[in-house]
Image (cartoon, helix red, strand yellow):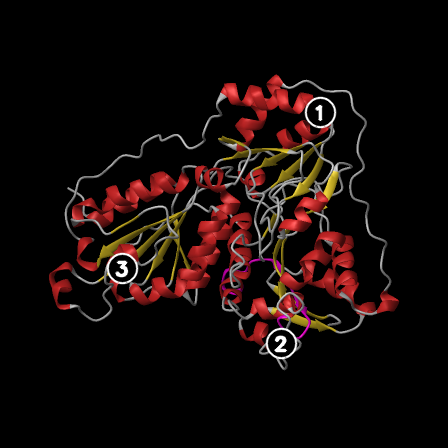
């Protein structure tokens, strides 16, 4: 009869979970005894970095990532990025050590009180099995739940003395993941689109996550619908140079209503339309308009304040609507126009940085972003044209995207579980100077693994995103937002990466080209005008 450790290793191998992201502690060590030769351990220097790397890896591969954390303190360190993984709908099996069952009544050093409650409410399911023999079954259940739509992280707390107990091996099962649409409701929505005279689409991260890119383009073109991106979307879900692309909705109620005014039908695809950042008043959609939502998350469908909701996999839902809708006769609306090009003579501005990066980056490169103050400029001057090529955090919590970029680069440099084909796609991290300092340790892992990725620091000397709120909160002077004296080149080199700093616009193109051609992690610190 196998031990719990042996049965778990076999199960993980069958589920494609042979890459483990972790930062080990004493209560986890028995899990690694007789560590399988075909497994890979990816070390992160802090637990939040571990979860961020696993998040990027899971999003890039399409399979759940396996995470191993230390007990209460380690899980506590990781909570910020567990929250983000939950908002990202990232499939992830998180395990954490626990002290030995025999001494738990005495509240031993490094034990977790109510371990399964600690990550709530930001995991889909959490458990500390009642018996050591049940650990493999718990991990299997955690995996199947993590992979079911809407995906998300799960959590299993494992006492240190469970690993050597005998148990029965378990075989992996086939468990469906995608939610099929209600065909009658899909037919009704198709009829609504056929009747609409001026429809608008609002796309969110669910389109890219559910692999519905081609179907959404086909539906938009069939009905000549303008396409907006939902507020704060963490993925690209429509080609941003497409004639029907209208732009990005802000997270403010009144502005959303203003931008969608004149449309008689609003179809939200993989998106919570009403993502607000500040308080607003009045209607949620323009008067006279109807709302339809297609999303794989029943919770979002339930709290959406109005309209019709079709809860299903976005790709399957849009395919069902395509089967029943007819191309109406209407003129093509005009989408967003490209901004005028900016000149180097204006200095090293954010606009010039984004425009130059768009000019020189490889066409199939992947952008991973966490630079809130430059996001609007990025959206204007760095259009994304391909699926699975833009990632940021859905939660708004800083410290996610730098380690996520490392996880994505690791997935692309190796053989992804779903395709088995190695990729040479360049991963480009675009981070604000304030954001970068939340998880800079991730660059050590990138250097240790020799990942060919490019990190661009948008360095404006502080937490500039907060300046947007000064008028709203009637604040004349912001406190605690300046970041003078950070040496990103020195920090990067200390982590084992190549690095350079750019302070003049005329030096930017050659510096970016060098950074993009490097075969190891290369950080470029770009001093943009505040």
Q: Which residues are magenta?
A: 447-463
Say which element carries label 3.
strand
- Crowd tier of the residue under label 2, counting other residues whose Cα lies within 10 Å: few below 14, some 14–19, many 20 or above: few
Q: Nearer the viewer, residue 446 or 212?
A: 212
Q: CA distance from mark 1 to mark 3?
A: 53 Å
Label 2 to label 3: alpha-carbon separation: 42 Å
Front position in the image: 382 or 456: 382
Give me the disc on residue 222: 1
Mark closer to the observer (1, 3) = 1
- Nearest the eye: 487 or 122: 122
Q: Where is mark 3, residue-wise?
A: 97
Q: Secondary structure at mark 2?
A: loop
Residue at the far bottom: name it. Answer: 485
The percent coordinates of residue 223 (x first, y second) are 71, 26
Q: Nearer the viewer, mark 2 or mark 3?
A: 2
Q: Which of the 4 image quarters holds residue 116?
A: bottom left
Sequence order check: which comes first, mark 2 or mark 1? 1
Q: Indicate whether 467 appears above or below 390.
A: below
Q: Which mark is residue 339?
A: none
Q: Which mark is residue 478?
A: 2
Nearer the camera: disc 2 or disc 1: 2
Whether residue 249 can be seen here: no
Q: CA distance from mark 2 to mark 1?
A: 49 Å
- Residue 370 percent coordinates (x, y): 60, 60
Residue at the image position 42 percent from the left and 33 percent from the top = 177
């Amino acid at each position: 009869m196998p031990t719990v450790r042996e049965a778990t290793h076999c199960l993980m191998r069958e589920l494609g979970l042979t890459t483990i992201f972790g930062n080990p502690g004493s209560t986890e060590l028995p899990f690694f005894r007789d560590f399988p030769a075909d497994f890979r351990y990816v070390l992160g220097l802090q637990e939040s970095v571990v979860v961020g790397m696993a998040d990027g890896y899971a999003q890039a591969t399409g399979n759940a990532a396996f995470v191993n954390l230390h007990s209460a303190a380690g899980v506590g360190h990781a909570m910020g990025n567990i929250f983000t993984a939950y908002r990202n709908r990232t499939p992830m099996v998180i395990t954490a050590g626990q002290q030995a069952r025999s001494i738990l009544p005495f509240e031993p050093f490094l034990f977790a009180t109510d371990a399964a409650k600690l990550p709530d409410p930001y995991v889909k399911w959490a458990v500390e099995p009642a018996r050591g023999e049940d650990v493999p079954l718990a991990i299997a259940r955690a995996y199947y739940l993590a992979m079911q739509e809407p995906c998300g992280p799960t959590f299993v707390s494992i006492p240190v003395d469970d690993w050597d107990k005998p148990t029965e091996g378990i075989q992996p099962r086939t468990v469906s993941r995608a939610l099929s649409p209600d065909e009658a409701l899909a037919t009704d929505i198709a009829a609504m689109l056929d009747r609409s005279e001026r429809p608008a689409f609002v796309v969110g991260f669910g389109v890219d996550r559910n692999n519905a890119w081609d179907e959404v383009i086909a539906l938009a073109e069939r009905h000549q619908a303008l396409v907006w991106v939902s507020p704060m979307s963490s993925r690209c879900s429509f080609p941003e140079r497409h004639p029907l692309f209208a732009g990005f909705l802000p997270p403010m109620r009144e502005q959303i209503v203003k931008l969608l005014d004149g449309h008689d039908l609003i179809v939200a695809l993989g998106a919570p339309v009403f993502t607000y950042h500040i308080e607003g008043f009045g209607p949620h959609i323009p008067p006279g308009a109807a709302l339809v939502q297609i999303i794989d998350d029943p919770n979002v469908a339930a709290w959406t304040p109005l309209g019709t909701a079709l809860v299903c996999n976005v790709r399957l839902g849009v395919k069902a609507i395509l089967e029943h809708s007819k191309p109406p006769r209407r003129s093509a609306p005009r989408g967003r126009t490209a901004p005028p090009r900016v000149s180097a003579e204006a200095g090293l501005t954010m606009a010039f940085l984004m425009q130059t990066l768009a000019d020189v980056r490889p066409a199939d490169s992947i952008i991973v972003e966490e630079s809130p103050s430059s996001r609007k400029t990025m959206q204007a001057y760095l259009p994304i044209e391909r699926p699975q090529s833009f990632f940021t955090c859905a939660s708004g919590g800083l410290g996610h995207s730098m380690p996520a970029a490392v996880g994505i680069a690791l997935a692309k440099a190796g053989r992804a579980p779903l395709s088995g084909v190695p990729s040479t796609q360049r991963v480009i991290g675009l981070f604000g100077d304030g954001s970068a300092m939340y998880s800079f340790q991730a660059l050590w892992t990138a250097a240790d693994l020799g990942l060919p990725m490019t990190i661009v620091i948008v360095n404006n000397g502080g937490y500039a995103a907060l300046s947007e709120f000064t008028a709203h909160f009637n604040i004349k002077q912001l406190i605690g937002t300046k970041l003078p004296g950070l040496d990103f080149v020195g920090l990067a080199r200390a982590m084992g990466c190549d690095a350079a700093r750019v302070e003049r616009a005329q030096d930017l193109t050659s510096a970016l080209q060098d950074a993009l051609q490097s075969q190891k992690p290369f950080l470029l610190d770009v001093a943009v005008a505040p």
